[in-house]
């Protein structure tokens, strides 16, 4: 199993970024996927999850209306569209695979990518 | 939202000794509790799920116990690679899925 995030970088407050996570080594559509972030020197925070077929999505209140999770099962890729970015969104964003192969979101994670750093600053 | 509280924040232990980490949920989470290990500069690694089931490849010196609101991760004999930060996470009541703030296990 490999999860490779990309798309992070420096962005001004109010700006947008799209994160990608390329998955390999497992049947992507059989597993829910999530984004978890970690602010510098802080703990882990669940951000957003999507079911295996993409029919169900969930997000933490602080990003609702600003972030959108999606997936392309034909390309084995997970996305996070981030709009109206704020300084408090600065973090390493990890892509994480659900342990359970049911496709439903269970949100406990057996594989994690190495993360991509998002910095929101003027 | 379920708040997960871990204690202590930092645990100083000598190599070869036992470490006991605690995690308390603000509401009942049954046994839907996972533990992760994170080494500096690395992604988290799943250690335990379902309160007590070790993930693939996790050494037997790691064990989990508890139910309801109180949980424990025990490392029976600390090895050098075990000095890290440990997080608990509940997946019973969601969203949101919530993590504890972490316990750092450091060398005494």
Image: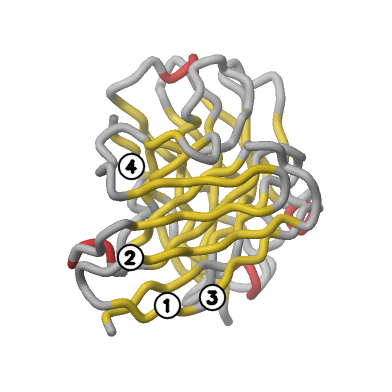
Q: Point out the tag, 1 or 2, that comes first from the N-terminus.
A: 1
Q: In the depicted view, which residue is nearer to us: A49 or B104? A: B104
Q: In the depicted view, which residue is nearer to us: B47 or B61? A: B61
| Residue neighbourhood size for the residue with mark 3, other residues' Cα within 10 Å, grouped as few (<14), some (14–19), many (≥20) | some
Residue A115, compared with residue B97, is above or below; it is below
Q: Chain of mark 1?
A: B
Q: Label 2, label 3: how many angstroms apart (C-alpha)?
A: 14 Å
> Which numbered tag is attached to residue A103?
none
Residue A29, compared with residue A8, is above or below; it is above
Q: Residue at x 63, y 63 (%)?
A: A15
Q: Residue at x 53, y 55 (%)?
A: B72
Q: Which residue is mark 3?
A: B8
Disc 4 to disc 1: CB gap under 8 Å: no
| Residue neighbourhood size for the residue with mark 2, other residues' Cα within 10 Å, grouped as few (<14), some (14–19), many (≥20) | some
Q: Which residue is mark 4?
A: A4
Position of residue A65 measured from the top left corner of the image (x, y, whole percent)? 80, 49
User: Closer to the observer: label 3 or label 4?
Assistant: 3
Pointer 4 and pointer 2 on the same chain = no
What kind of element bears circle 2?
loop
Q: In the depicted view, which residue is nearer to us: A11 or A36? A: A36
What kind of element bears circle 1?
strand
Q: Which quadrant would residue B105 be assigned to in this image?
A: bottom left
Which quarter of the rendered picture does the N terminus of chain A lie within?
A: top left
């Amino acid at each position: 199993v490999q999860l490779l995030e990309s798309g992070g970088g420096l962005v001004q407050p109010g700006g947008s970024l799209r994160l990608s996570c390329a998955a390999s080594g497992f049947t992507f559509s059989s597993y829910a996927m999530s984004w978890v972030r970690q602010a510098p020197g802080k703990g882990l925070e669940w951000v957003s999850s999507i079911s295996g077929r993409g029919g169900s999505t969930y997000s933490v209140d602080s990003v609702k209306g600003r972030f959108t999770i999606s997936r392309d099962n034909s390309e084995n890729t997970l996305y996070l569209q981030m709009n109206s970015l704020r300084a408090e969104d600065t973090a390493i964003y990890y892509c994480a695979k659900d342990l359970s192969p049911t496709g439903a979101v269970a949100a406990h994670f057996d594989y994690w990518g190495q993360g991509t750093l998002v910095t929101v600053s003027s | 939202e379920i708040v997960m509280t871990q204690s202590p924040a930092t645990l100083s232990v000598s190599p070869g000794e036992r470490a006991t980490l605690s995690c308390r949920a603000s509401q009942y989470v049954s046994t839907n509790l996972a533990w992760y290990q994170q080494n500096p500069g690395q992604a988290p690694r799943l250690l335990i799920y379902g309160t007590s089931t070790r993930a693939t490849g996790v050494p037997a010196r790691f064990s989990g116990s508890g139910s309801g609101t109180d949980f424990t991760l025990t490392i029976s004999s600390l090895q050098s690679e075990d000095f890290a930060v440990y997080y608990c996470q509940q997946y019973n009541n969601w969203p949101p899925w919530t993590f504890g703030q972490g316990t750092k296990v450091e060398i005494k």
